[in-house]
Image (cartoon, helix red, strand yellow):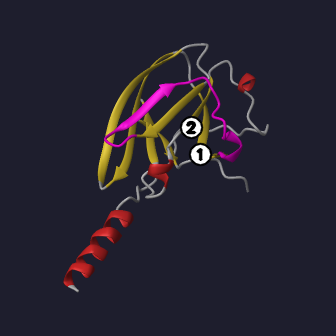
Amino acid sequence: MKLNILLLLLISSLFSSCALKPIQSEFKLQRTFSDPVIIGEFDNGKILIYNGAGFNHKIDNSSFINVWINNKPLGQLMSNEFAVIYLLPGKYEFKLVHKDIKNFTSIHTIEIDNDTKIICVKPTITSNKAEITNIIPNNFHLFRNIIRQK
């Protein structure tokens, strides 16, 4: 009986400990009006950043990622969410934090140029990943902008 209670407490703490407190964006987030988003819309520094979390991170809510760019908060990207912002060409420091039993923080230097259109951020089993993909994922029609439609 004690073993069952201990096991239940352990499992519930694993699944309840994965809530990451959201952060407010200090960027001017952009709305998108085409559905699905067309990659040709992204030019002159307009960048789409999406959370490419896989199934394993979605089942325990560890897919939520807080994103900072050059120490300025972009906000929290949940699985299947994206943000659109303007960034001038140059080097940017992306700080990513996701919570799974503990906080996993990573810092990535990404160089934005005139050809950069799409950046994927996602949690990994021991850290986070950020990469320029310039490719819209296949299931992008399921994604939503972090600017909620009112």
Q: Amino acid at mark 1?
A: Glu
Q: To which residue does mark 2 refer?
A: 50
User: Tags 2 and 1 in contact by the CB under 8 Å rule?
Assistant: yes
Give the x, y percent position of residue 2. Answer: 20, 83
Quadrant position of residue 30: top right
Give the x, y percent position of residue 141. Answer: 71, 43
Compared to residue 93, the image places residue 105 above or below, namely: below
- Quadrant in the picture for the C terminus: bottom right
Residue 59 in view (yes/no): yes
Dominant secondary structure, magenta? loop
Residue 23 in view (yes/no): no
Quadrant position of residue 35: top right
Q: Secondary structure at mark 2?
A: strand
Q: Residue at x 48, y 35 (%)?
A: 121
Left or right: 47 as drawn, with respect to 62: right
Disc 2 to disc 1, C-alpha distance: 6 Å
Q: Secondary structure at mark 1?
A: strand
- Picture disc at residue 9: none
Q: Residue at x 36, y 51 (%)?
A: 99
Q: From the viewer's side, name the closer residue of 10 and 28.
A: 10
Q: Earlier in the sequence, mark 2 or mark 1?
A: 2
Q: Within 10 Å of the Cα at label 2, are there few (<14), some (14-19), or many (20+) other Cα atoms?
A: many
> Is-magenta flag for residue 42?
no
- Quadrant in the picture for the N terminus: bottom left
Q: Residue at x 73, y 38 (%)?
A: 32
Give the x, y percent position of residue 46. Answer: 64, 25
Bounds of the magenta segment: 124-143
Q: To which residue does mark 1 refer?
A: 81
Give the x, y percent position of residue 149. Answer: 72, 53
Q: Residue at x 43, y 58 (%)?
A: 60
